[in-house]
Amino acid sequence: MRKRYGTRLQKLSVNAGFSCPNRDGTVGVGGCTFCDNDAFSPGYCRPDRSVTSQIDRGLEFIRKRYPRATLFVAYFQSFSNTWAPLETLKKVYQEALAHPTVSGLVIGTRPDCVDAEKLDYLAELSKAHIVKLEFGIESCHDDSLRRINRGHRFADSVQAIGMAAERDITTGAHMIFGLPGERREQMLAQVTEINKLPIHTIKFHQLQIVKGTPMAREYAENPEEFELFAPEDYVAFVCEYIARLRPDIAIERLSGEVPPQFNAGKKWNGIRADKMIAMVEQALEEKQLHQGIWYA
């Protein structure tokens, strides 16, 4: 971000009240089995507040934590933020862009929630603003996607990301490591498919079992189906993944954080994102590895 824009890019999370096609009955109900938005959404993100109000509250929080931040984008994070008619999306996005501190949009969505018309609009927006689409891929294995009630196939991710790339829209991908039924060799092998995608960024997220979700019940009944990571194991795994990852893909996140009161699985005893970054960097140095060293 510093190379591209000259400064840190700071996100202001927004919950615009969207849903998902696997929640509203379009392709399913109940949503993804791992999902509880309350486990990762900031407290100021409430759909009963306007987009402008949420941005104002986010600024109060961010300016205390990152007082030197100067470039802000509205981060539509909760649920699928292109899952609405285009006119609705235009209204919501334009309200965010009308805020005097907002320079662009980061839009989290699913691959089955975009089409040519929406992508054409985002491509036009990107000529004057920062615009980034983040696609939840989660896994390259269709069996895993069915098991977590995702409601789309990996082929849908390939198609949607390709359509965005054709329009020069900046795209990112989100992956979860440790989904039920997947072993580490299978997780690691997915990097070959990820390397083929025309993405600009990627986020890694170790699976965390969130209390009250269908996955928490599945984990309680069949824990042997899950290969959850201890911190040291996760560091070793991520190092191998990074070594195979195409070197031009920017890694935005190495791990996720669910508040302890939500976590029903393995806890990392206070190891937060910044500590995980330091642990991975140290391990890469010790192993004499870097991103893409094993990329063929």
Image (cartoon, rainbow, N blue to C red):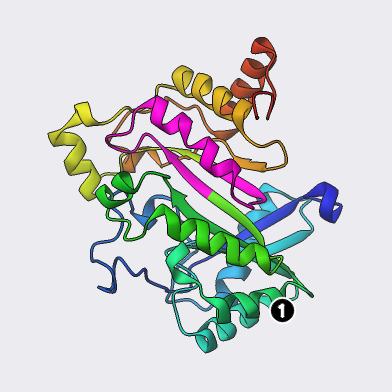
Q: Secondary structure at mark 1?
A: helix
Nearest the viewer among 85 and 267 is: 85
Residue sitting at the far top: 286
The relative height of residue 165 versus residue 187 in the rendered view (above or below) is: below
Verify whether residue 197 appears in magenta. yes
Verify whether residue 64 appears in magenta. no
Label 1: few (<14), some (14–19) or many (≥20) C-alpha neighbours in 10 Å: some
Nearest the viewer among 294 and 91 is: 294
Residue 165: % across, % down? 65, 62
Where does the magenta region start and end?
174-203
- Locate residue 24 relative to residue 49 in the image: left or right: left
Residue 265: % across, % down? 29, 32
The structure residue drawn at horizontal position 27% and vertical position 31%, both measured from the top left corner, is 226
Three-letter amino acid code at disc 1?
A: Glu
- Locate residue 210 relative to residue 176 in the image: left or right: left
Q: Quadrant of residue 13?
A: bottom right
Residue sitting at the far bottom: 87
Q: Which residue is mark 1?
A: 124
Residue sitting at the far left: 221
Which of the image's four quarters has the C terminus? top right
The relative height of residue 56 versus residue 283 in the rendered view (above or below) is: below
The structure residue drawn at horizontal position 51% and vertical position 86%, both measured from the top left corner, is 88
Residue 92: % across, % down? 56, 81
- Locate residue 213 relative to residue 131 in the image: left or right: left
Residue 271: % across, % down? 50, 27
Q: Is residue 99 visible?
A: no
